[in-house]
């Protein structure tokens, strides 16, 4: 008598039941997940810091007495010396960025706040506006108290930022203070760097013990994700520095106003792929516009030329095919990542998309080769 295999039906019923429970008790589940995420936030932040530090640490390890790598003293001191060097380098880099960027951003915002209202007043009273703009529109603009309007806009933006910050704090730091979270994150990142090899070995042993069937796939996906994030971080940082230097030199040559301020802002926003430099360019054009509309127009032409040089010559040489993602998918990654997680989503969306794209691409090539091998003997027989 033929027996029916019930395992597939049991699995399907179990999945349907779990989905039903998840939808029915979603509020309770989301609350539990939120609390869990709050508890894990120091570890997540620490791992993120450790991941960036590990890039520097690997670089230092590569050049830490390579000719004497077999010596006992080199083996024992390599991890500690390189970990300290990477930590000191990161502190120096962050300090330099803060000293360069934060004052420039504050100056930029205060400049826009103080100069845009008078500039709008000049534009409204100019001969061009009187000649080409309808009188009722001009009267409406003249009736606006621009300093108060700008102040209200700034207050609205500040309120929105404050509300967003309060929401993030309530989600992530509801039970743990900010100071303790930062402290635990730093401790975890330092511990991870010093115990990196041991933790990696333990993770591989756990995978081999509990999921041996998927061991190769897990290691393969992890390796591709690691390569994508590492190359993306290094490439974007190098590109941002190059763009900042070129923008500074170009603006000084053409004698554009606020060269250092705008260049720092453009270099800082260049960390975000594609969209970042244009954000900085728009802010820079608005600042120059308050001084000279003609120079603002020339500045936009300069930025467009610089972007073409950077995109076609510098970016392929510096980053090359490290990301391995076509421009259309980079734009999609930025759009989707930004919509889901804001600025952080823009940053992590590109390497994640690049990893997925590479995995799918290699799988398609592998399947095509198998198909060709299968059809090959048949075609010869015919």
Image: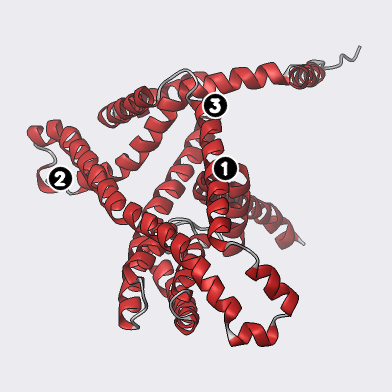
Helix, strand or loop at label 1? It is helix
* Residue at image point 67% right, 88% down: 131
Helix, strand or loop at label 2? It is loop
Q: CA distance from mark 3 to mark 1?
A: 17 Å
Return the residue at label 3: 171
The N terminus, quarter of image: top right
Q: Could you say which disc has been placed on residue 160 in the image? A: 1
Q: Earlier in the sequence, mark 3 or mark 1?
A: 1
Place of residue 370 in the rendered image (x, y in percent of width and height, measured from the top left): 64, 50
Residue 33 visible in the displayed image: yes
Disc 2 crowd rating (10 Å Cα; few below 14, some 14-19, many 20+) is some
Q: CA distance from mark 3 to mark 2?
A: 42 Å
* Residue at image point 48% right, 45% down: 224
The C terminus, quarter of image: bottom right
- Camera-near label (2 vs 1) is 1
Q: Nearer the viewer, residue 302 or 294?
A: 294
Quarter of the image for residue 24 reads: top right
Place of residue 129 in the rendered image (x, y in percent of width and height, measured from the top left): 63, 82
């Amino acid at each position: 008598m033929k027996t029916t295999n019930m395992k597939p039906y049991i699995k399907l019923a179990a999945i349907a039941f779990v989905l039903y429970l998840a939808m029915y008790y979603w509020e309770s589940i989301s609350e539990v997940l939120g609390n869990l995420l709050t508890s894990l936030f120091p570890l997540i932040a620490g791992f993120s810091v450790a991941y960036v530090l590990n890039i520097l640490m690997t670089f230092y390890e590569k050049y830490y007495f390579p000719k004497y790598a077999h010596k006992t003293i080199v083996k024992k001191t390599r991890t500690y010396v390189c970990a300290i060097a990477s930590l000191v380098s990161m502190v120096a880099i962050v300090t330099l960025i803060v000293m360069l960027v934060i004052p420039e951003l504050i100056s930029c915002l205060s400049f826009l706040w103080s100069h845009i209202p008078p500039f709008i007043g000049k534009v409204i009273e100019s001969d061009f506006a009187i000649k080409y703009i309808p009188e009722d529109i001009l009267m409406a603009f003249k009736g606006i108290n621009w300093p108060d309007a700008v102040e209200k806009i700034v207050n609205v933006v500040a309120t929105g930022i404050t509300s967003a910050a309060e929401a993030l704090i309530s989600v992530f730091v509801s039970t743990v203070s900010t100071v303790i979270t930062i402290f635990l994150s730093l401790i975890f990142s330092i511990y991870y760097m010093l115990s990196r090899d041991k933790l990696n070995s333990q993770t591989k042993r756990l995978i081999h013990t509990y999921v041996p069937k998927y061991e190769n796939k897990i290691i393969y996906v992890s390796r591709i994700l690691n390569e994508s994030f590492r190359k993306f971080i290094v490439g974007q940082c190098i590109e941002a520095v190059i763009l900042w230097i070129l923008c500074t030199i170009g603006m000084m040559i053409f004698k554009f106003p606020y060269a250092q301020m705008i260049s720092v802002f453009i270099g800082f926003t260049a960390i975000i792929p594609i969209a970042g430099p244009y954000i900085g360019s728009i802010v820079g054009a608005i600042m120059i516009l308050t001084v000279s509309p003609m120079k603002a127009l020339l500045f936009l032409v300069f930025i467009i030329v610089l972007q073409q040089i950077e995109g076609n010559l510098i970016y392929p040489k510096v980053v090359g095919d490290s990301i391995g993602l076509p421009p259309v998918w980079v734009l999609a990654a930025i759009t989707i990542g930004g919509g889901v997680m804001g600025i952080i989503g823009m940053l992590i969306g590109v390497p994640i998309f690049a990893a997925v794209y590479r995995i799918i691409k290699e799988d398609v090539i592998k399947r095509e080769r198998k198909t060709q091998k299968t059809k090959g003997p048949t075609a010869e027989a015919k």
